[in-house]
Image: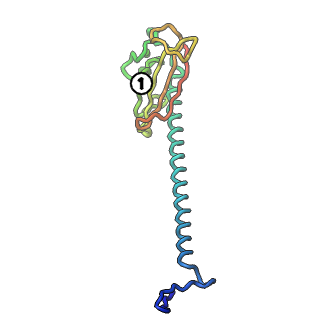
Amino acid sequence: MKFEIRNSKFEIPRCSRGNGFSLIEVLIAVVLVGLAIAALVVASNSFTMANGAGTDLSTAEFLVEQIRELTALLPVADPQSGTATFGPEEASLAGYDDLDDFDGANFSPPIDAGRSVLTDFAAFSQNVTIEKVSPTDFELVVSDFDDSPFVRVTVKVFLNAKEISSSSWIRARY
Ligand SMILES: [Ca+2]
Ligand SMILES: [Ca+2]
């Protein structure tokens, strides 16, 4: 482009058609491309976040399943005493031999169904609560000393102290 002085006034010569783009056209194109890229980056970030949350949830559900499997075959009442004494009578996890031994247990790092520590998931933890519930209303928690044969198992999975997943089920003393 050339600036010409005519009659003491500056005139900006216009681009004639077919002779490339004007500065304004180029600027508008740059802004539009910029907006498109920004939109793509935002969309990509939110997809990554959603995907990450999905992975965490799958891991949490896997960790709930490990406790479910581990406790599925354990009796509700202690095999020696025959009573459901809430909390462990044994010194360590390896000796837990009834469901309520797991009451109040917190596994961090979490454990698998074979009671092995899952160090690869160290950011996660499993919290187990065992409660007696009323035979007529499983939503109603009764005293640990009640003679109800039903207990409710609740497993909560935390990721860096934030609860990710929670699951409950009912077991009966038999
Ligand atoms: Ca026991
Ligand atoms: Ca016990």
The answer to which of 150 and 19 lies nearer the viewer is 19
Across and down, in percent, residue 7 comes to 49, 92
Q: For the residue marked with disc 1, what is the amino acid?
A: Ala
Q: Is mark 1 within 8 Å of ligand 2?
A: no
Name the quadrant of the C terminus.
top right
Outermost residue toward the front?
A: 7
The residue that mark 1 highlights is 105
- Count neighbours of disc 1 (C-alpha within 10 A) and say few if under 14, some if 14 to 19, many if 20 or more: some
Ligand 2 visible in quadrant: top left
Please, is residue 65 above or below residue 42 in the view?
Answer: above
- In the rendered image, the vertical position of residue 14 relative to residue 123, given as above or below: below
Q: Position of residue 84 (x, y in %)?
A: 46, 12
Residue at (43, 40) in percent of width and height: 120
Residue at point 56%, 16% (across, down): 138
Measured as percent of width and height from the top left, residue 80 is found at 44, 10
Element carrying mark 1 = loop
